[in-house]
Image: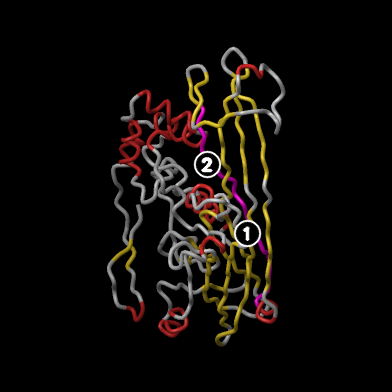
């Protein structure tokens, strides 16, 4: 399994929607976290055809009963960061769960502003070295649960006086990953990974921000195989077209990952990709924006006013890092973002008929 490349791709894809231009809370984009969300089933039951509580990856692999499979499911578990304003009479007492506080959207502290925001923690469920023979005889079912929690920390002004607090609240999420295999031909298996959010819906409102607290956000699945080979679902051999067409993928698109021709790794993403996706070497880092165009977003960030840049830096560490990275780009790096010539890879499709060329940038 090309774990290093998978990690780099997933790290970029997981955070699509974490920050969206114009990267400031005063101009909030209400559609953050727009990819790969698996919502609580009680919430989705009344919304057929809209949000889903399950995701399924299905693909084909050549191998034997002893062929080993590794599966990783990753998603983001959201954290509500709320800013609390303390009454002046509180003085400099200890901060704990009983500290009286009035929650606000933002709090000015000296020359800066602290904002309420939604952060995220990465979660992973992993199954290692599962042999296809055993999986075909006995499917695996792995439950998971990540608990709720609340933490508070003091906010002090430049003189050291206590003026507020930050509360980070996380709701529990739980679910199950089901892994199965079925022999569908000579040394050929159909592999299924099904993920289900089984969190009991506890929100008292349909407010999207609250629902997302119990959602598996930006869910991605990766599969690695040892002593076997995955079959491309985009460009399969003619003899396997019917079988690949019968693979049911729900809310996700599995593609081969690695160097051109590698067949030991699949990444299944809620963002549509082609086989062998790559991160453009010219890109200085993630801009978090869906369908991002590095040059345009980079130039837009550079033209923000000083006040807008200050607001972006105050948002959180990711926004601050993005701003610092953008402002430190050398002229040569900026020119590289203007465009690159790449060799296009023809997509033959089923039956060998040419369907144009696919490139990457």
Magenta residues (range): 114-132
Image quadrant holding the N terminus, namely bottom right
User: Foreground residue, 110 or 65?
Assistant: 110
With respect to residue 34, does 120 lie above or below? above
With respect to residue 194, does 289 lie above or below? above
Taken as a whole, is the magenta stretch helix, strand or loop?
A: strand
With respect to residue 208, does 102 lie above or below? above
**Given the current orientation, which residue lies at the most extreme bottom position?**
186
Magenta segment: does it hold 312?
no
Magenta segment: does it hold 118?
yes
Per the image, label 1 sits on a secondary structure element best described as loop
Residue that carries the numbered disc 1 in the rendered image? 200
Give the crowd class for mark 2: few <14, some 14-19, many >=20 residues within 10 Å.
some
**In the displayed structure image, the side of residue 157 where residue 237 appears, left or right:** left
First along the sequence among labels 2 and 1? 2
Choose mark 2 or mark 1, whichever is in front. Answer: 1
The structure's colour scheme is secondary structure
Give the crowd class for mark 1: few <14, some 14-19, many >=20 residues within 10 Å.
some
**In the displayed structure image, the side of residue 288 where residue 184 appears, left or right:** right
Q: Position of residue 87 (x, y in %)?
A: 60, 21
Residues at badges 2 and 1 in contact (C-beta under 8 Å)?
no
Q: Where is residue 159 in the image (x, y as percent from the top left)?
A: 59, 12
Per the image, label 2 sits on a secondary structure element best described as strand
The residues tagged by marks 2 and 1 sit, at their Cα atoms, a distance apart of 21 Å
Q: Where is residue 25 in the image (x, y as percent from the top left)?
A: 43, 35
Q: In which quarter of the image is residue 349?
A: bottom left
Residue that carries the numbered disc 2 in the rendered image? 118
In the image, what residue occupies the spot 42% across and 40% down?
284
């Amino acid at each position: 399994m090309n774990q290093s490349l998978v990690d780099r791709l997933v790290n970029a894809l997981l955070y699509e929607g974490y920050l969206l231009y114009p990267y400031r809370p005063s101009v909030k984009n209400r559609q953050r976290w727009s990819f790969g969300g698996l919502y609580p089933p009680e919430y989705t039951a009344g919304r057929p055809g809209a949000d889903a509580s399950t995701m399924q990856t299905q693909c084909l692999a050549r191998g034997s009963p002893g062929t080993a499979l590794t599966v990783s499911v990753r998603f983001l578990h959201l954290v509500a960061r709320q800013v609390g304003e303390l009454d002046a009479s509180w003085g400099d007492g200890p901060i704990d769960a009983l500290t009286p506080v009035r929650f606000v959207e933002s709090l000015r502290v000296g020359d800066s502003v602290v904002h309420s925001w939604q952060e995220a923690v990465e979660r992973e469920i992993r199954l290692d070295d599962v042999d296809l023979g055993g999986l075909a005889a006995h499917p695996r079912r792995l439950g998971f649960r990540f608990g709720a929690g609340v933490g508070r920390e003091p906010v002090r002004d430049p003189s050291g006086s206590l003026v507020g607090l930050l509360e980070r609240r996380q709701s529990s999420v739980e679910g199950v990953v089901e892994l199965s295999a079925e022999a569908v031909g000579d040394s050929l298996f159909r592999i299924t990974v099904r993920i289900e959010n089984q969190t009991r819906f506890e929100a008292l409102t349909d407010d999207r921000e609250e629902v997302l607290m119990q959602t598996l956000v930006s869910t991605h699945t990766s599969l690695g195989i040892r002593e076997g080979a995955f079959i491309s679902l985009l460009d399969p051999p003619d003899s396997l077209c019917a079988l690949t067409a019968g693979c049911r993928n729900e809310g996700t698109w599995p593609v081969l990952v690695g160097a051109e021709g590698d067949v030991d790794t699949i990444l299944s993403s809620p963002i549509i990709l082609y086989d062998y996706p790559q991160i453009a070497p010219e890109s200085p880092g993630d801009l978090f924006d869906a369908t991002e165009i590095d040059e345009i977003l980079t130039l837009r960030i550079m033209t923000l006013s000083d006040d807008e840049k200050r607001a972006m830096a105050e948002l959180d560490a990711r926004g601050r890092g993005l701003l610092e990275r953008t402002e430190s780009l050398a002229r040569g790096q900026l020119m590289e973002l203007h465009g690159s010539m790449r060799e296009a890879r023809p997509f033959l499709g089923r039956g060998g008929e040419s369907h144009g060329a696919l490139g990457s940038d």
